[in-house]
Every structure is written in C-alpha cells, then in structure tokens.
Image: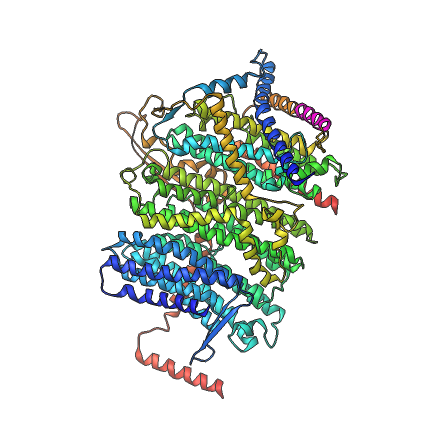
C-alpha cells in the first residue's frame, strides 16, 4: 500500500468512526430512557425518539439572552468539537484508530475538560442563578472525577505498556501482555464505571430527567439554551455517554473488535460493538431505576471510593508483578 | 555576541538613568519603556543565539575587590532564562507605556521606570553571572529593585506591609543561598563558578546534603514553595501589574534557575534518590495547596499570585521526577523530566504574565481588584477578554494550548516511573500524577470562576458598567504574550529541540530525536509506544469537528435568525444581585475541603421588632484560616520578639556601658588572636 492510500484509508476510518458516534449516540440515550420506562411500568417513547427531538430542535428558532456574550453561542460548537475529537481517540469497532498518535488517555480526559470548562462559562453567561448553580456544582464534580479517571486508566495502561487507547485495546484484543490475575482490572473497571456515571451526568450523581432546578447539575447549565444550540449540546452529551461506554467496553472487554481492516472483521466489529454498548446502556438504565440520586455532598464519597479503587488497582498490579 | 551583550547592558543602564530627567511623567514613562524594549529585543536575540551556539560564551572583567570578578557565562541553561526574561520583559515594557498613565500624579513614574529597567537588568545578570560573589550582588540587587517596585504605591498601608514582609522573607532566602555558596567556597577556595564545578577537594557527603538543603530553602523562598510561599500572595498583587507579571512570570523562575545550576552544574547531577523525592513532594504539595488557596481568593491579583505557587509546584514535579530518574541512572527519562519542567517554566512565564497584564487592564478600567465588582466585561472590553481567555485556557491546561502540552509531558514522566526499581518510587510517582490531575482540574474550576465572574453576565458594579477598553499599547503587550502562548502550544517540535540543548548540557543525553516522532508531528516521552501527543493535529481535528457542527446545523435546520430576549428570572427582572458570586461559585469546593480551609462563617441577623420573620439587617463574614501563618510563622515571630525583649537588657542607653562592651570585645578578640 502506498503512502497516499494509507492516508486515505486513515481518513476514511476516522470519518467512519465519527459517523458511527454521531449516528448511534442518540439511540443509546433513547434506549436508556426506554429501559427506565419499562422498569417504571410505562410504555415509554420509542428508542429512536431522540433523533426526532434533535431534528425538531435544529429547525426551531433559537432564543438567546440579551445578557450573554459570544461565549454563549460559541460553547455548543466547542463542546460538540471537543466531544467528537475525544470520541475519535477511543476505538469503537476497529481497534487501531488512525488518530491514536494524536493523543492518549490524558488527552482524552483533558478534551472532555475543555468542553466542561466552556459549559461552565456558558452556565454563568446568562446571569441566571440556576446556570451559576449548575456551573458551580459541575466544577466540584469534575474536580473529583478526573483524578479517579486518570488513575483507573493508568492501572490498565501499565498492563498494556501504553497509555494510548488504541494500543491498549489492540494489545488486549490480541491477548498480548495480559495479566493472569484480573483483580487490578476489576477494580479499575469499577472505578471507571463510577467515573462514567458522574461525568455523563447520570443517577446517582445527577439526574438527566429532573425538572426540579434545585437538584440539577448538567441540565441547569443548559437552561438558557434552545434551538440549534441545544441540539448540538444534547448531541454532544449523547456522544460523551457513548464514548464512555466504548471506553469501558473496549478497554475491559475488547473481544470481537476488528483488529484488521477487512470488510468481514469490520462488520463483525461493528455488530459486536453495538451489542456491547447496548448492553451497557441497559445496565445504566437499570441502575438509574434502582438507585436514588445522591445528595450533592454525598457524591464526594462515591467519587472518593472510585479514586481509592483505582489506587488499589494500581497497588495490586505492582504487588502481583512483584 | 559580545556586541549584543553591550547593547543590552547599555540600554538597560540608559533606561535606569533617562527616566530620572526632569521631564513630564508621560515622557519619563515612554523613555523607560523604549530603553527596555531595545534591551529586551537584544535579550531575545542573545537568548536565541546562546541556545543554538555550540559552545558557551564567556567574558569577564576583573575588579579591585578581592574574590569578585564580573564574570559572565552564557551557556544553554542561561540562554533559556535570558530568552524567557526578555520575552516577558518586552511585553511588559510595551504594556507599561499605557499602564503607567494611571499612576500620573499619584506616584513617581520616574522611579518606577528606572527601577523597572534595573529589575530587568539584575535578572539578566543573575542568570549570566559566573562568579558566586557577583551572583549574590545581582541577586540582592534583584531583591531590592523588586522591593522598591512592590512599594510603588507606598501611601497605602497594606502595600507597605506587603513590601516589608517580602523584604524579610527574601533576605532569609538570600542568607541560605550565601550559606550554600560559602560551603562551595570553603572547598574550592574561589568564588568562581568554574571552581565550584571542579573543586580541589570534593565536598564530603554530609556537606553536599547540607548544601542541597540550604539551596532548596534559599531558592525555595524566592520560588514560593509551600510553606515558604506566604510572602508571595501579599507582594505580587501589591506591585503595579506589569511588575507583578515580571515577578510572577519570571522572578520566581530565577529560583528554578539557581536550583538547577546548583544541582546539575555545581553538584554534577550526582545525588541520592531522596533529594529528587523531596523536591517532588514539595512540588506536589505546593501545586495542590497553591490552587486550593487560589480558589478562595476573590482579589484577582491575589488569585493569580496563588496560582504561581501552584505552577512552581508543577514545575518542581517535572524537575523532581527528572532528579529521581537521574539518581537511578535513567538518563533519558531524567532529561524528559527536565524538559517537561523547563517547558512548563517558559509556558507559565508567558500565560501568567499575560493573566497579570489582563488583571492590570481590569484594574486600569475599573479601579478595583475585587472580582465581585466586575461582571459583563467581555462586552465592554472584548480584546482584554479574549486575551485573558487565552491565558485562562492555557493555565487550565486545556488542549491544544501550551499549558496542556507541558503538563502532559509532566504526566508522562511521572507515569514512566514504573521503570524505576524501587517500589516506593513506583507507587509515589503515580500518586503525584493523581495530585497533578486534581490540581489541574481545580485550576480549571478556578479560572472558570475568574473568567466567568469577571467577564460574563451582568456588570456587578458601576465601575464595571462604565469600564472601557484599554489603550492600544496595553492590548499589544497582551496580544504579544497570547500569540506566544498559542505558538508554544502548537509548535512543540520547535520548542523541544531548543529545550533539549539545555537538558543535554545538564544530563549529557540528547533526547530530542526520540521525543519527536512522525517527522515532528507527534510528541512522545522518549518511548513512542508508551504514549504520544500531537497538539497541532488535535487543534486541526477540533477545528474540523467544529466546522462539522456548522455543517450539521446548515443541513438539518439552517441558520435561522436568533431571537433576543431577557434571561428568565422566575418572573422578576434579572439584576446583578441574583447572579452567582465568586464566593457562591466555590462554596461546594470550600465545603468538601473544609479540613484544609477551616472556614469561619459568621452570620449576624438583626430582626424587625414587629415580626421575627423579617430581617432588618444581615451581616455575613467569612474567612479561611491561613494555616501556615497561624501555626508556623506566628510562633517564630513571637519567639523572635521574646528573644529581642531579653536582649534589650544589653541595650541600656548608657554610652559608658557601650564603650565597655567595645573594650571587652576587643580584649576577647585579642585573646583569640593570641
């Protein structure tokens, strides 16, 4: 294969991944809502309802507060861009992402932080006390999740000898350098799962379905948004959720992912990937029905547990390796 | 190169004298700035030449004072710092043209301009000095000129207090540096740095450790490491803002220079692992506590000053990791840690100076430093707002900015600790990485607060409502630094080879080729398999993804005209009093970390006599306990006072008694001499 072909292939694979993220993410949100509705003995909206919601929001005229600055209108685009870029670093259906070289797990965490930073600013921009409240709470939740996230991935990274996500997934998928004892992995998995719930604003940290301003975190920051801006933010949030699910699915259970770029492997990879993230979505829906949202200052305990678990995973790794 | 050096020295010297001419304040200020601009431009050229020159450049002038020669040596390490000082100095000099205007008629612009040039000159000489005696003289000159700059507005009592506190702390630090140099002098018999490097009798192990600890305390005081940082949040905000930019951006880095000079040059880079470990722990604690206290500050300049403590901590994390690797003989990783530390050094110099200049612009426009009185300034001051945002994003280490690139490198050097044979190091370094992660994200929260409360939403006071954009010279100064921040973030392939020349001279290993993979597009911590980062590609993908967002909007709904409406305030008209305040914003963080803050909240309510459900007046007081001042400094100060009280017996006020003391002293000395 010539260099030009290789570059074209890389671009094609990147675009395909972007397309999968954009196309699948609203369905994941719809699936979680469906699961919750069934647990609550409701029929619920169909799984594909979020697509219709997005389409409607895109067509609506946006209302913008006179108090706001350009930060408010730029934030949806920045959030969308940072989430999509982060999504391109995490392998979904193929294990070797072309953009692997551009950033590792730290870059992933910080790309999410870029979106969070601007969302916090946007929450403050309209001058409404609700937005400020959401921003302030988001700041504390983000502060406590990120160290746990970095530590949990690092425990896995040590096994694979790399912090680049594609390399981790690819090596694990080919069963290279996997440890016989799974305990560090399990601890890191538990930590990362808690982090994922907190980062994507799910129960028990935040409630995406709440209509009570006083309990909101993520939704409170979006209160002033409407029209295409809200559509972009909703889509970005859905993608963030999907990226976290891909991360958990592929780092801890990369089986079935396409390790080569043959059409057969890619289609199997895609099917397995969809099954995995759908399974995780059902799990999240179940958790949301079984647990109540925690009080804000109890969230710190939960995130502290995540951090300690990740740290223990690291300790176990060194002890088992001797 | 000698010519450049002469131009630099001459223009600083002229810059120290020219403003003192009896002209209009405006002309005096302009004269000081023009001289400084010429000098800093030649400084930038000198730094770049020095970084690319194959051999260090040396020159010296003998003096009549024994042990003192005015020896100058421009090696890679010195060149790096000359470049950093000159870049920040250039921005500050341009900025000063407009900024000193609001001092006209209040304070002496002549003295300000003269000391400004003297301060820059003394910092340049600190890094160029190749003689211990000469170094101490210019170090002291640096401390004194900066003291006089701190007390520029000496009519205010708190400024005088800040200056005095600074003066005492900096001299305590200098005393320890003198101690270090005396130890080297004792072994080599000369104050020349060349003799320090190759002493006749190598220092015994105990004395080496002592020299290290003295240097750590001495330079650490200047750098503002915890717990020696207490002067910094007083002194840096008290100075005029372009001076704060120099102090926070560059002066504290002189301590990093001194520490590296002592450790890797005089001591030859040979030390046990616990030295590096000590530096690492100090770095982690400084970084974390620095940002914690910054969060609680609502005076914008104090907030920035605490962030200097944080960033010095981050730099020390890189250097400490490098030292640990060095002591285990892992030369490449040692070079990596040092490259990371130095990268963060120049990055912090740029964005911190930028932020201080931004804070100065806000002060210039609103006449207050209290964040709670800002608000809505992005609309009134769009350029200042944009530049401040670039600085904020950089210091919060968000990709693809320069702060992110250097923090990423520091993370990698901490993660690579699994190659060290010692279990405790293996475990502690990732823990330091977790501390760094916590620090970085708290810094994000802090700058979301600083930018959000200051620049967004409704103006919170009439000052903010009537603020106007600052003059062009101030915008130019900030814009210059913002451009450098962007450049340093997007072009690591240019920066890393230059830094590599510095670290190669310290560790003897060049790693630039290993760090730049894929024709320089990706940055790797020596081992490209372990991790890689490409900030230009990330920036490109980010822009592409944002463009995709625009395309999607165009596809699915088109760009319908926006409708403008007021923010919904639950039926009330939104007023600034309803907005979240800076205090309110950090309340959850204050509560979560209350063990560290030990906050005292006092709420007094005076109720109406008619009904106890309505309050007539409420008084809310809140402050956090300054732990170090209370538990560490107060006892020491009290002890000094007690000792002084005891010693007063000697000072009876009688001339005869004093004569008797002299006589007794002479006799005792004579006895010793015999």
Q: Is residue B519 above or below residue B148?
A: above
Tally of numbered discs: 0
| Residue B169, image quadrant | bottom left
| Residue A147, image quadrant | top right
Q: Is residue A255 above or below residue B654?
A: above
B564 horizontally vs B342: left or right = left
Q: Is residue B81 visible?
A: yes
| Residue A148, image quadrant | top right
Residue located 34% across and 43% down the image: B370
Q: Is residue A241 above or below residue B516?
A: above
Frontmost residue, B516 versus A174: B516
B36 horizontally vs B68: left or right = left
Frontmost residue, A150 versus B593: A150
Image location of residue B500, percent across then percent down: 57, 57
Residue located 42% across and 39% down the image: B449
Q: Is residue B173 magenta?
A: no
Report the residue that reaches farthest toward the right.
Answer: A180
Residue located 43% across and 66% down the image: B4
A73 horizontally vs A265: left or right = left
Q: Is residue A310 visible?
A: no
Which secondary structure type mostly characterizes the magenta part of the structure?
Answer: helix
Q: Is residue B1 above or below residue B386?
A: below
Image location of residue B511, percent across then percent down: 62, 56
Image location of residue A76, percent across then percent down: 46, 30
Image location of residue B528, percent across then percent down: 65, 47
Specify how the rendered protein is coloured: rainbow
Residue range in magenta is A263-276
């Amino acid at each position: 294969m010539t260099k030009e072909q290789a570059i074209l292939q890389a671009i094609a694979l990147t675009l395909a991944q972007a397309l999968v993220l954009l196309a699948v993410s609203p369905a994941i949100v719809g699936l979680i809502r469906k699961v919750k509705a069934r647990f609550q003995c409701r029929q619920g909206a169909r799984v594909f309802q979020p697509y219709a919601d997005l389409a409607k929001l895109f067509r609506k005229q946006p209302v913008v507060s006179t108090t706001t600055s350009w930060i408010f209108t730029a934030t949806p685009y920045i959030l969308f861009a940072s989430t999509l870029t982060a999504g391109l670093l995490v392998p979904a259906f193929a294990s070797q992402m072309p953009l692997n070289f551009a950033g590792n797990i730290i870059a992933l965490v910080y790309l999410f932080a870029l979106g969070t930073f601007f969302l916090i600013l946007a929450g403050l921009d309209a001058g409404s006390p609700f937005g400020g409240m959401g921003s302030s709470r988001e700041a504390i939740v983000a502060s406590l999740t990120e160290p746990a996230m970095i530590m949990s991935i690092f425990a896995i990274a040590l096994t694979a000898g790399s912090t680049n996500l594609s390399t981790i997934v690819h090596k694990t998928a080919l069963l290279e350098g996997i440890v016989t004892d799974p305990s560090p992995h399990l601890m890191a998995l538990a930590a990362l799962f808690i982090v994922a719930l907190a980062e994507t604003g799910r129960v028990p940290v935040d409630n995406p379905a709440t209509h009570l301003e006083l309990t909101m975190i993520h939704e409170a920051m979006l209160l002033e948004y409407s029209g295409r801006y809200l559509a972009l933010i909703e889509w970005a949030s859905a993608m963030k959720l999907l990226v976290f699910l891909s991360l958990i699915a592929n780092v801890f259970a990369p089986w079935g992912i396409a390790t080569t770029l043959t059409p057969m492997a890619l289609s199997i990879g895609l099917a397995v990937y969809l099954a995995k993230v759908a399974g995780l979505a059902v799990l999240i829906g179940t958790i949301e029905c079984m647990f109540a949202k925690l009080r804000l200052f109890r969230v710190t305990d939960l995130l502290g547990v995540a951090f300690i678990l990740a740290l223990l995973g690291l300790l176990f790794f060194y002890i088992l390796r001797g | 190169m000698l010519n450049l050096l002469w131009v630099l020295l001459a223009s600083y010297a002229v810059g120290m004298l020219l403003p003192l001419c009896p002209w209009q304040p405006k002309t005096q200020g302009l004269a000081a700035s023009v001289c400084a601009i010429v000098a800093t431009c030649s400084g930038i050229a000198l730094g770049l030449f020095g970084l690319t020159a194959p051999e260090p450049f040396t020159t010296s002038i003998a003096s009549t004072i024994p042990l003192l020669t005015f020896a100058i040596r421009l090696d890679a390490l010195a060149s790096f710092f000359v470049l950093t000082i000159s870049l920040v100095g250039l921005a500050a000099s341009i900025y000063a043209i407009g900024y000193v205007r609001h001092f006209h008629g209040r304070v002496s612009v002549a003295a300000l301009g003269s000391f400004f040039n003297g301060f820059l000159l003394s910092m340049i000489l600190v890094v160029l000095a190749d003689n211990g005696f000469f170094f101490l003289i210019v170090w002291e000159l640096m401390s004194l000129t900066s003291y006089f700059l701190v007390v520029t507005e000496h009519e205010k009592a708190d400024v005088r207090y800040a200056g005095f506190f600074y003066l005492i702390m900096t001299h305590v630090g200098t005393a320890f540096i003198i101690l270090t140099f005396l130890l080297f002098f004792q072994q080599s018999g000369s104050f020349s740095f060349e003799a320090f490097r190759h002493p006749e009798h190598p220092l015994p192990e105990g004395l080496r450790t002592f020299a290290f600890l003295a240097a750590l305390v001495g330079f650490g005081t200047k750098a503002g490491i915890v717990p020696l940082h207490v002067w910094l949040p007083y002194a840096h905000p008290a100075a005029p803002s372009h001076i704060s930019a120099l102090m926070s951006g560059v002066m504290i880095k002189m301590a990093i220079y001194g520490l590296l000079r002592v450790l890797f040059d005089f001591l030859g880079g040979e030390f046990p692992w616990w030295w590096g470990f000590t530096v690492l722990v100090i770095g982690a604690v400084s970084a974390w506590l620095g940002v914690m206290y910054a969060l609680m500050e609502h005076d914008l300049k104090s907030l920035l000053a605490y962030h200097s403590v944080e960033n010095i901590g981050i730099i020390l994390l890189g250097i400490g990791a490098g030292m640990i690797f060095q002591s285990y003989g892992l030369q490449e990783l040692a070079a990596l840690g040092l490259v990371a530390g130095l990268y963060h050094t120049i990055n912090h110099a740029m964005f911190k100076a930028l932020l201080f200049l931004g804070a100065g612009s806000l002060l210039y426009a609103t006449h207050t430093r209290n964040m709670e009185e800002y608000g809505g300034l992005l609309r009134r001051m769009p350029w200042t707002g944009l530049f401040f945002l670039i600085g904020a994003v950089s210091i919060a280490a968000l990709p693809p900015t320069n702060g992110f690139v250097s923090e990423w490198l520091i993370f990698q050097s901490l993660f690579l600790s699994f190659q060290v044979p010692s279990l405790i190091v293996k475990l502690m370094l990732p823990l330091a990485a977790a501390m760094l992660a916590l620090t970085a994200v708290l810094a994000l929260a802090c700058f979301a607060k600083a930018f959000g409360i200051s620049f967004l939403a409704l103006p919170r006071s009439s000052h903010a409502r009537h603020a106007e954009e600052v003059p062009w010279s101030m915008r130019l100064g900030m814009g210059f630094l913002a451009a450098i921040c962007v450049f340093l973030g997007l072009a690591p392939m240019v920066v890393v080879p230059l830094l590599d020349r510095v670290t190669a001279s310290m560790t003897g290993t060049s790693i630039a080729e290993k760090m730049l993979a894929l024709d320089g597009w990706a940055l790797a911590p020596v081992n490209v398999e372990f991790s890689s980062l490409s900030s230009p590609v990330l920036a490109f993908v980010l822009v592409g993804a944002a463009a995709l967002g625009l395309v999607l909007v165009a596809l699915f709904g088109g760009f319908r005209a926006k409708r403008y409406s007021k923010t919904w305030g639950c039926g009330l008209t939104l007023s600034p009093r309803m907005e979240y305040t800076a205090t309110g914003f950090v309340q959850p963080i204050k509560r979560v970390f209350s063990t560290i803050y030990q906050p005292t909240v006092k709420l007094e309510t005076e109720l109406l006599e008619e009904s106890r459900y309505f309050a007539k007046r409420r008084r809310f007081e809140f402050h956090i306990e300054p732990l170090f001042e209370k538990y560490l400094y107060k006892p020491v100060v009290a002890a000094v006072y007690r000792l002084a009280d005891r010693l007063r017996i000697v000072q009876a006020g009688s001339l005869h008694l004093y004569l008797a003391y002299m006589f007794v002293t002479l006799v005792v000395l004579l006895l010793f001499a015999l």
